[in-house]
Image (cartoon, rainbow, N blue to C red):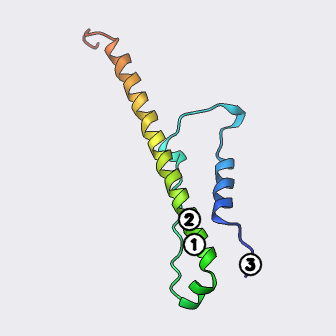
Amino acid sequence: MPLLPSRRARLVAAALLTMPVGGVAQGATALDCLPPVPPVPVTDAATRAEYRTEIGREFTAYFDEAQAYLRCLDAARNEVSEEINRAIRDYQSLGSEPDG
């Protein structure tokens, strides 16, 4: 069987490759959130029995990654909500003068 990096290793690599350069922190956006890839179902009973521990670890990692994904989406939603509130305040500060 060829040696493939684990899903977690691939996600860590993807996260490192997409980090902002220069230490500038930006708010999360939905584009920063990568949904996890669900484990492939193993239907063969012998394979399930032989690799039960490994399969269990893969599902546990998936559930952890799914929670991180949902937290990322929540952070992105909060960031957009803050931006909307700032825009509303800026708009309201224009006053009631007609446009043009």
Q: Nearer the viewer, mark 2 or mark 3?
A: 2
Q: Mark 1: few, some, or many residues within 10 Å (few <14, many ≥20)? A: few
Mark nearer the N terminus (3 vs 1): 3
Query: Circle 2 sits on which residue?
Result: 60
Question: At 53% across and 51% down in the image, what residue appears?
Answer: 68
Circles 1 and 2: CB atoms closer than 8 Å:
yes
**Disc 1 and disc 2: Cα gap in Å?**
6 Å
| In-front residue for pair 50/22 | 50
Q: Quadrant of the N terminus?
A: bottom right
Residue at image point 50% right, 54% down: 67
- 56 vs 20, left or right, is left
Report the residue marked by disc 1.
Answer: 56
Amino acid, disc 3:
Pro
Image coordinates of residue 18 in percent, x first then y, are: 64, 46
Give percent across and percent down for residue 62.
Answer: 54, 63
Residue 36 lies left or right of residue 78; in this view the side is: right
Residue at 53% x, 75% y: name it.
40
Q: Tag 3: Cα neighbours inside 10 Å, few (<14), some, or many (≥20)?
A: few
Which amino acid type corresponds to the residue marked 1 in the rendered image? Gly
Residue 45: x and y in percent read 53, 89
**CA gap, disc 3 to disc 1?**
21 Å
Q: Quadrant of residue 55?
A: bottom right
Kind of element beneath mark 3: loop
Tag 2: residue type? Thr
Query: Please, what secondary structure does the residue beneath circle 2 have?
Result: helix
Task: Please give the residue where the numbered disc 3 appears in the rendered image.
Answer: 2
Q: Nearer the viewer, mark 3 or mark 1?
A: 1
Looking at the image, residue 95 sits to the left or right of residue 60; the answer is: left
